[in-house]
Image: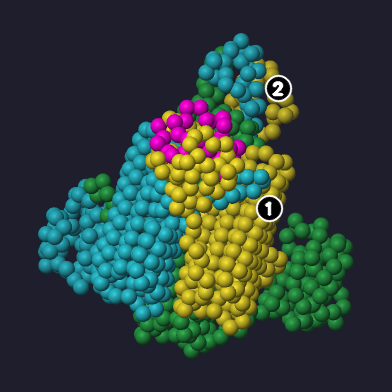
Chain colours: A green, B cyan, C yellow
């Protein structure tokens, strides 16, 4: 399909600097766009590519507009406007409603007639599937699962007993929601399994990345609030609660019974301890460890960037000898007749 | 179902402080229990919730009993006793023995008649499935796999050729046991695949969390001993051995040919190098890196908790300038006529 | 099957020190080999096991040959030679060409008659499967996927729309290639999904480990070049490019739009930031964080090995008080009439 720049400007509330008759057919990067493509500029890292772009049009903010050789669709939030135009130019194939003959659907399941159940999907007793929901191939929905309208389970998603998924949420392939939480009581040198009786409630407009796991609650439910976005290979422990519109990057682990506030941004490969609470609007940068509750909004870090390995080994060796540094300072202070203040004297 | 406190006290060896006729129907948290619910107190973090609980009864230790407004089932190990009562009050649905018609079972497989093979499961040649074993939907068992009695493969578990699973072990959805180990020989700038001929032996009473992977051995088997509990998204490399009753939290990686002792507790997101050995009764706290063998039982750490990001950047900058600290100390020592001791003088 | 040492020496270009008539039937470790087994010595950690081995023959380098009690196949690259002999002695079962009756294959898919499609696999419209390709049970190939000759999808591999897999590549169970990249535009306190229109191109001779995820590109393709080896539970973000013959160990995360050069070796549980570039021949040791581009080949690190926990806590406390160290040094320097050089005075 193709759309004129004039129509795009009107539909998405942009200021058009260029010919409204020009048409674009697809999106492309600034570097590789041609005259039939629409590109965008949102991340300043890619500003330098603007001068040489051959795009038919570029979506961008007024502040970046200088020296753009192409037609411009100027708006306040170019990334969001780009997302909308890309959705228009690259529509998903229409949903083929109905149940694939190879799917196995329990007699008491209620599948909305406008929903799609893909090949080899298995649907347990009393499952409820809402309008226009998409259940991809190889998905497995255990008893009493509920999917609201327009949910998309891309492929091979596993939902345990009584898991609830809110409207429009998207679960990428390999997601497991509602596996047992990790609960074992120590007894006589072994570990006794503690039944995991709760389930998982996922709000509306949530995205869960490929192979991410969210465990069912021990007694009450694990909760993912509306608008949360989880990347791939994330672990969410039992009874955790992730606040609305928080985003979590890949490979991060949230331990059990921990609460994350609203609008938090948690980087990749962050580890968050169990039974703690992180307030709203907290940013944790990639690779950090959170071992205690965070009660003030702000940015928190604890990762150290790489050094050349030989230098790094010397840094670590010095770090591990830091008691000696202290001792040398004390000797010098004594020699100089200087006493450390009480604040300085922790060791 | 409901059970009287009197019966619970007798069955589970508790001292009852309260009316033996009172009946409970389910378990609940201290905060949300009602008069028909049984709660428990094991983690002192939740002690404060005791005063206001409306639970019908609370399982707890004698030491915590003061000021509890509810009936009490007093015992030495309240978490284990709670686990047993929860299992009684919330029984799993009975196993429907038999093979689902959509399952694909090879002619030479031997499935015990009391076992269950779920929808769309695939069972290879010469697989042996023991009594009362549960094979959930979408599980895939390659040739020569053996499952002992009462094994549970929750859903979508993949077991490679000749994998052995001991009695009563529970594998959560998405587990992969017996994928090829990561073995490649460097040769002329490329990597030649080394056949992974071993398999994996998993002992009795093991639990493996969702999407965890355990690789097959290069020559001999990778071994998970009895009673081990593995959380979600853990990687166990080829030829590793995990000692009996060790527990490992989510997102941890154990490299190939490494041996972990018995009764170890490994935190989440721990990285353990290959070809090393960790003795019995070692605790490694979350987020730590183990690069050498550990020969003494004890607790080991190397993670640094988060700081506010601006403070953190200054800490890292100072850390990376630690050679300058050393130099400044030396100057001062020279000026003061103090020589560092040999121990201090590593750099 | 069994092979004589004489034949092995000729076929694989080894110098035989021993009886050419002796035959071996299988491979084994030095410690557990018997007279019918062939072992190898490549890692010097296992040198001590050589003296006691009862192997029928050992593959090794000339430098290690002293004191070996067994026949020797001496060669320059014993690990690669071992790999070839192991492949000969332990051949994979022959591929049973054809489509399993339980597989679901779209009408427009083209499956080479010499290929194998396993039980419960699902194959979308216009998929192309090359000669001798193996598609294991429960694999899911979305529309327009292409597999070149001799590709192996071991089991339960999910390939999203239009994913391309080069010849001879091997994908272990649970791999997800072509899930949506993690792209969301912030707008009015929520996150708007950005369509992920690109796909994933995987080159020839690539291996991808169990449950690893590789996201589809936002606009252009995510690219894994030929000969790359990825271990289990790795995350590759959208639009990343991994250079030819690079190897990445388990649990590592590569953020979106990052480029890794050729022949890099990335350790386990490494986190690499987005939108950066790592040049060829870079080694990053396990557990490190890479937050900026690396422009010189070399070895890079930032992980700290464990200490006993009490010692570690004191180290961390001292580290976090490093501003006080600085202050104490300054006082001493003032007292001694020494001024820090400009280089020293960053804080």
Whether residue C293 is in magenta: the answer is: no
Which labelled disc corresponds to residue C339?
Answer: 2
Residue B187 percent location from the top left of the image: 63, 45
- Residue B250 in view of the camera: no
Query: Residue lying farthest bottom?
Result: A113
Q: Quadrant of residue B154?
A: bottom left
- Residue count near mark 1 (Cα–Cα under 10 Å), binned few <14, some 14–19, many ≥20: many
What's the CA distance linking mark 2 and mark 1? 49 Å
**Magenta run includes residue C60:** yes
Q: Farthest residue in the top direction?
A: B337
Counting residues from the start of the chain, the first of labels 2 and 1 encountered is 1
Q: Please say whether residue C300 is visible from this viewpoint.
A: yes
Give the residue at x 57% y 19%.
Answer: B345
Q: In the rendered image of this protein, does residue A311 appear above or below residue A152? A: above
Q: Nearer the viewer, residue A272 or A176?
A: A176
x and y percentages locating residue B313 in the rendered image: 62, 42
Percent coordinates x, y for residue B247 in the rendering: 36, 49
Q: Quadrant of the N terminus of chain A?
A: bottom right
Of all chains, the one bearing label 2 is: C
> Which of pointers 2 and 1 indicates the residue nearer the eye?
1
- The residue wearing badge 1 is C243
> What span is in magenta?
C52-81
Q: Is residue C27 left or right of residue A314?
A: left
Give the residue drawn at x 63%, y 73%.
C128
Residue A66's place in the image compared with C252, above or below, is below
Q: Which mark is residue B90?
A: none
Q: Are marks 2 and 1 in contact (CB under 8 Å)?
A: no
The secondary element bearing badge 2 is classed as loop
- SS class of the residue under badge 1? loop
- Chain to which the residue tagged by mark 1 belongs: C
């Amino acid at each position: 399909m193709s759309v004129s720049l004039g129509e795009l400007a009107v539909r998405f509330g942009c200021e058009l600097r260029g010919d409204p008759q020009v048409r674009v057919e697809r999106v492309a990067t600034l570097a590789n766009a041609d005259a039939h493509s629409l590109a965008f500029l949102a991340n300043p890292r890619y500003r330098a590519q603007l001068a040489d772009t051959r795009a038919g049009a570029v979506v961008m903010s007024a502040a970046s507009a200088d020296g753009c050789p192409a037609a411009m669709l100027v708006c306040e939030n170019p990334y969001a406007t780009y997302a909308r135009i890309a959705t228009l130019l690259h529509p998903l194939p229409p949903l083929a409603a109905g149940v694939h003959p190879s799917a196995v659907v329990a007699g008491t399941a209620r599948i909305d007639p406008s929903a799609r159940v893909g090949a080899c999907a298995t649907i347990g007793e009393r499952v409820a599937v809402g309008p226009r929901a998409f259940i991809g191939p190889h998905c497995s929905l255990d008893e009493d699962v509920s999917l609201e309208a327009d949910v998309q389970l891309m492929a091979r998603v596993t939902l345990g007993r009584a898991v609830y998924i809110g409207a429009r949420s998207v679960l990428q392939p390999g997601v497991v929601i509602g596996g047992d939480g990790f609960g074992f009581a120590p007894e006589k040198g072994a570990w006794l399994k503690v039944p995991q009786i709760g389930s998982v409630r996922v709000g509306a407009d949530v995205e869960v990345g490929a192979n991410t796991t969210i465990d069912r609650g021990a007694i009450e439910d694990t909760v993912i609030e509306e608008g949360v976005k989880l990347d791939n290979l994330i672990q969410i422990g039992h009874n955790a609660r992730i606040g609305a519109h928080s985003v979590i990057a890949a490979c991060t682990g949230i331990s059990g019974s921990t609460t994350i506030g609203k609008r938090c941004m948690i980087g990749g490969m962050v580890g968050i301890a169990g039974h703690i609470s992180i307030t709203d609007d907290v940013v944790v940068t990639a690779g950090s460890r959170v071992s205690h509750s965070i009660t003030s909004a702000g940015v928190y870090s604890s990762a150290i960037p790489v050094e050349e390995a030989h230098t790094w080994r010397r840094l670590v060796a010095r770090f591990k000898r830091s008691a000696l540094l202290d001792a040398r300072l004390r000797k010098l202070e004594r020699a100089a007749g200087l006493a450390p203040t009480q604040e300085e004297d922790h060791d």
